[in-house]
Image (spheres, rainbow, N blue to C red):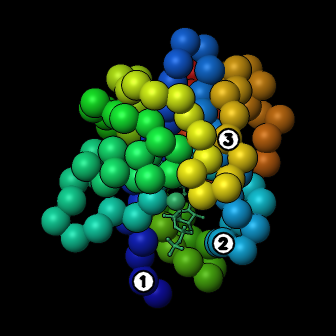
Amino acid sequence: MKLIHVAVGVIKQGNRILLAKRPLELHQGGKWEFPGGKVEQDETTSEALIRELKEEVNLDVMNTSPMMEIHHDYGDKKVFLDIHWVENFTGTAQGMEGQQVCWVEKEDLQQYDFPEANKAILEKILS
Ligand SMILES: Nc1nc2c([nH]c(=O)n2[C@@H]2O[C@H](COP(=O)(O)OP(=O)(O)OP(=O)(O)O)[C@@H](O)[C@H]2O)c(=O)[nH]1
Ligand SMILES: [Mg+2]
């Protein structure tokens, strides 16, 4: 099975984190996620994330910093999530692909339904 390298951004503004809802037709559709997407050839994780965050939520990101890496096997798909903190950006978040986005207080994150692989990310954010 192919391994998918994904750049994932935990976008932070004060005590709030940006979440986006995955479109129903996609893998893990209907769940909330941290915005991001596949890393393409010849791109660093940070470059991929900066590109994806512009495309998906219209934010202009200056830089990102590594937070953690997660390998997860969904059975139908294997993912390598390369997660970065994103704290330096400008613009107003909006779902450019019609997806819902929202800023959520850290303490309220556990009320949202995330893909299985995201458990460890939540623990890290709350630690
Ligand atoms: N962006 C993002 N992807 C996540 C998270 N957690 C998680 O398991 N994933 C998985 O990472 C994979 C890559 O997501 P993606 O947005 O780049 O790709 P996609 O499903 O849109 O596929 P496509 O671009 O081929 O249509 C998906 O299988 C998704 O389920 C997360 O928090 N954020
Ligand atoms: Mg994506």
Q: Amino acid at mark 3?
A: Val
Q: Earlier in the sequence, mark 2 or mark 1?
A: 1
Seen from the viewer's position, the closer of residues 119 and 98 is 98
Seen from the viewer's position, the closer of residues 125 and 92 is 92
Q: Is residue 42 left or right of residue 56?
A: left
Q: Is residue 7 visible?
A: yes
Residue at image coords 63%, 79%: 75
Q: How many marks?
A: 3
Give the residue at the far top of this rendering: 14
* Residue at mark 3: 101
| Ligand 2 has an atom within 8 Å of the beta carbon of the residue at disc 3 | no
Residues marked 2 and 3 touching at CB (< 8 Å): no
Q: Is residue 64 left or right of residue 42?
A: right
Seen from the viewer's position, the closer of residues 127 and 43 is 43
Image location (x, y in percent) of residue 6: 42, 60
| Ligand 1 has an atom within 8 Å of the beta carbon of the residue at disc 2 | yes
Q: Amino acid at mark 2?
A: Leu
Residue at image coords 56%, 78%: 77
Label 3 sits on a secondary structure element that is: strand
Q: CA distance from mark 2 to mark 3?
A: 16 Å
* Residue at mark 2: 26
Label 2 sits on a secondary structure element that is: loop
Image location (x, y in percent) of residue 26: 66, 72
Q: CA distance from mark 2 to mark 1?
A: 17 Å
* Residue at mark 1: 2
Q: Nearer the viewer, mark 3 or mark 1?
A: 3
Residues marked 2 and 1 touching at CB (< 8 Å): no
Seen from the viewer's position, the closer of residues 68 and 9 is 9
Residue at image coords 83%, 35%: 111
Answer with the quarter of the image where residue 14 lies. Answer: top right
